[in-house]
C-alpha cells in the first residue's frame, strides 16, 4: 500500500513537470510566431538634400557655315583656333557665271530705264498736243500711256533682278556673324563647293567667351528651381576648383523619356580656360517639398511590382503605395495616403505579411 502511494505521487509530479514543459514550449513558439518590429511616427516635412548631376559646357552661340552659292574656294583666311570678330572676312569664293549674270542684269536694268524715259517723253508730247482739238486721237494717247506703265513695271523688275544678283555676289565673301573661335575647317583653296550639299560645313564658328552650362534635372527637383538660384559646379579638367553659377534659363519642357527638364546656366569664360564640350559635375540644393511626408529610408520597400511603406493601423499592418522624392542616407520623402502621426515599420521588407 505504501509503495502504491509513492508511485501515484511520483506519477502526479511527473505529469505536472511535463505539462509545465509543454506550456513553456508553446509560449516560446508564440513569441517566435509574433516578432516585434520597430516603428516610427510619420512627419510632414520635406527632406533637404544635395544631388550631384552630370552636365556639359556648350558654346553660347555656334554656327556651321555652308556656301550660299555654287563656286570655287579662292582663299581661306582662317584656320582652326583662330579668334575672329564679328564682320571679319573668313574666306572668299569665286563664281564667273554669277559675275556674268550680274553684269547682264545691270545692262537690262539700264536698257529698261532708257526705254521708259523715251516713252515718258513721247507721252508728254502727245498729251500736250491733245490739248488742240482733233490733233491726237484718244486711242493713241491711251496706247502710249499704257506703254509707259508697262515700261515702268519692267524697270522695277529689272532693278529687283539686278539687286538680287548683287546680293548673290555678296555671298562670295564669307564673314563672321559674331565674335568667336574657328573650331572646324573642311575646305581649301580650289575646292568646289555646292550650295545644295549639307554634308560638312566649310567652317564651324563657336562663341567661347560666353558659354552655356546645360544639365538635365529630374522633374521633381526642376519644379523647385527658379531663375537666379545659385548652383555649384566642378569642371573635370580642373579638379577641386569650385565654381558658382546661377540658373539663367529653364526649358519648361519635360523630356518624356528621361523625365527631366533642361536647365541652363550662363558661364563667362573671360580667361579662356573653358571650352565647349567639357564635362561638368553640378551640385544642386534640393530644398524638399513642404507637402511631403518624411520617413526613414529603410521604411520604403521597393519590389518589382510596387513601392510601398507598411503602416500600423488598428493593430494591423497595411501596405500603402507611395511615391518618393528627395532622399538622404537616413530619410526619404514619400507621397501617398498617409497622415501625420501614422506609425510605419522602420526596417520593412517584402516578407512581412
Image (cartoon, rainbow, N blue to C red):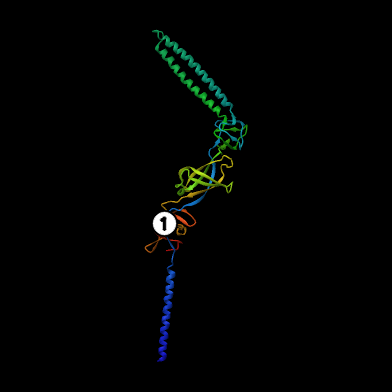
Name the residue at the left extreme: 314
Structural crowding at the residue carrying mark 1, measured as other residues with C-alpha within 10 Å and reported as few (<14), some (14–19) or many (≥20) = some
Is residue 306 visible to the viewer in this orientation of the structure? no
Camera-nearest residue between 196 and 57: 57
User: For mark 1, what is the residue?
Assistant: 43
Counting every numbered tag in the picture gives 1
Depth check, front residue: 262 or 150: 262
Front residue (pair 132, 332): 332
Residue at image position (54%, 28%) is 168
Residue 301 vertical position relative to residue 146 in the rendered view, above or below:
below
Quarter of the image with the C terminus is bottom left
Q: Position of residue 163 (x, y in %)?
A: 52, 24
Q: Kindly indicate the quadrant of the structure image that contains residue 338.
A: bottom left
Quarter of the N terminus within the rendering: bottom left
Q: Residue at left 43%, top 80%?
A: 17
- Residue 335: in sight, yes or no? yes
Q: Secondary structure at mark 1?
A: strand
119 in relation to 205, above or below: above
Amino acid at each position: 500500500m505504501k509503495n502504491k502511494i509513492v508511485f501515484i505521487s511520483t506519477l502526479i509530479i511527473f505529469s505536472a513537470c511535463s505539462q509545465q514543459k509543454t506550456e513553456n514550449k508553446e509560449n516560446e513558439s508564440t513569441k517566435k510566431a509574433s516578432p516585434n518590429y520597430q516603428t516610427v511616427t510619420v512627419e510632414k516635412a520635406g527632406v533637404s538634400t544635395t544631388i550631384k548631376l552630370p552636365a556639359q559646357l556648350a558654346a553660347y552661340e555656334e554656327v556651321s557655315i555652308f556656301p550660299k552659292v555654287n563656286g570655287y574656294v579662292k582663299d581661306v583666311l582662317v584656320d582652326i583656333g583662330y579668334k575672329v570678330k564679328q564682320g571679319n572676312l573668313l574666306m572668299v569664293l569665286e563664281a564667273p557665271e554669277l559675275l556674268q549674270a550680274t553684269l547682264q542684269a545691270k545692262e537690262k536694268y539700264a536698257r529698261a530705264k532708257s526705254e521708259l524715259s523715251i516713252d515718258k517723253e513721247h507721252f508728254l508730247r502727245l498729251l500736250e498736243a491733245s490739248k488742240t482739238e482733233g490733233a491726237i486721237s484718244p486711242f493713241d494717247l491711251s496706247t502710249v500711256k499704257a506703254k509707259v506703265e508697262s515700261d515702268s513695271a519692267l524697270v522695277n523688275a529689272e532693278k529687283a533682278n539686278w539687286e538680287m544678283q548683287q546680293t548673290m555676289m555678296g555671298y562670295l565673301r564669307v564673314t563672321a556673324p559674331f565674335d568667336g573661335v574657328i573650331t572646324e575647317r573642311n575646305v581649301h583653296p580650289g575646292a568646289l563647293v555646292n550650295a545644295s550639299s549639307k554634308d560638312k560645313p566649310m567652317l564651324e564658328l563657336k562663341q567661347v567667351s560666353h558659354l552655356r552650362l546645360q544639365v538635365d534635372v529630374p522633374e521633381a527637383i526642376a519644379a523647385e528651381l527658379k531663375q537666379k538660384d545659385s548652383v555649384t559646379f566642378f569642371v573635370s579638367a580642373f579638379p577641386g576648383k569650385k565654381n558658382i553659377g546661377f540658373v539663367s534659363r529653364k526649358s519648361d519642357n519635360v523630356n518624356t523619356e528621361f523625365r527631366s527638364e533642361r536647365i541652363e546656366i550662363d558661364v563667362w569664360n573671360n580667361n579662356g580656360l573653358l571650352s565647349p564640350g567639357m564635362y561638368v559635375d553640378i551640385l544642386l540644393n534640393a530644398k524638399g517639398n513642404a507637402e511631403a511626408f518624411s520617413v526613414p529610408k529603410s521604411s520604403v520597400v521597393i519590389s518589382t511590382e510596387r513601392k510601398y511603406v507598411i503602416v500600423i493601423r488598428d493593430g494591423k499592418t497595411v501596405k500603402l503605395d507611395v511615391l518618393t522624392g528627395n532622399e538622404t542616407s537616413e530619410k526619404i520623402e514619400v507621397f501617398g495616403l498617409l497622415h501625420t502621426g501614422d506609425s510605419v515599420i522602420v526596417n520593412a521588407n517584402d516578407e512581412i505579411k
